[in-house]
Image: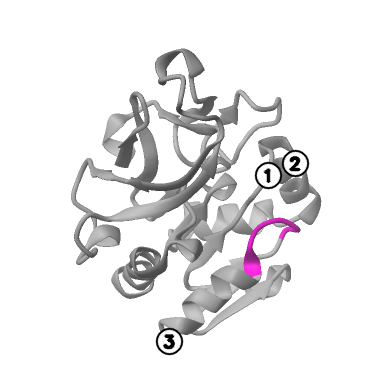
Amino acid sequence: MVTIVDYGVGNLASIQNMLKKIGVSSSITSNENEIGVAEKLILPGVGAFDTCATKLEASGLKNILQQKVIQEKIPVLGICVGMQLLTEKSEEGSLPGLGWIRGKIVRINKDKIPDNYKIPHMGWSEVNFVKESKLLMNLPDEPRFYFVHSYYAELFDNNDQLLNIDYGYTFTVAIEHDNILGVQFHPEKSHKFGMRIFENFVNNY
């Protein structure tokens, strides 16, 4: 069973539908007791960093998430802004992130990309492997994922970098530190590539 954290943002139904396609049962919940018995967590997020941080704070779930992820060390997968919340802070806002991954979220630098490249970066992009990971096992050839973002993670420790892309310049789009994983792209919109990411998260952690 995978527990999808409902704190008022994110493509919750889309994530659940993709899990269903690969035969994985999941629950969408904002209930602290249900999260308290979770074995694996998905933290979604769409929109602005501060909006998501505000809603997460208002949900009252930060303490139980801290307990599950940091103390019990159960696997967590952050998606899109859910990944960004795993870090310490963001240039997009003033509120703190969860601070589970050392680093900050920064805006894609328009001065480093060609004029015909747009911000937000939207659409399919191929990814580059930075290190081996159970999350990336048996991905189809030429793995690519669907993105919609203007910001990315700038990490304190490059050992936490899992995937990057070349979008005029190279930056991080997936992170992993022990039981804490995050992807900037939307696996729930990434067809067979996203299915494999979810399968690996469920089966390998």
Q: Can residue 182 be seen by looking at this rendering?
A: yes
> Magenta region: which residues?
7-12
Q: Sequence-wise, which precedes: disc 2 or disc 3?
A: 3
The colour scheme is one colour
Residue at image location 77% in from the left, 42% down from the top = 54
Counting from the top left corner in percent of width and height, residue 24 is at 45, 83
Badge 3 is on which residue? 23
Mark 2–mark 1 distance (CA, rounded to whole Å): 7 Å
Locate residue 99, reporting x and y percent.
54, 37
Please give the name of the residue rendered at 66% of the width and 53% of the height, measured from the top-left corner. 63
Q: Is residue 137 left or right of residue 146?
A: left
Report the front residue among 98 and 9. Answer: 9
Tell me if residue 37 comes above or below residue 78 in the rendering: below
Residue carrying label 2: 51
What residue sits right under mark 1 in the picture? 47
- For badge 1, the amino acid type reads Gly
Crowding near the residue tagged with mark 1, few <14, some 14–19, many ≥20 C-alpha atoms within 10 Å:
some
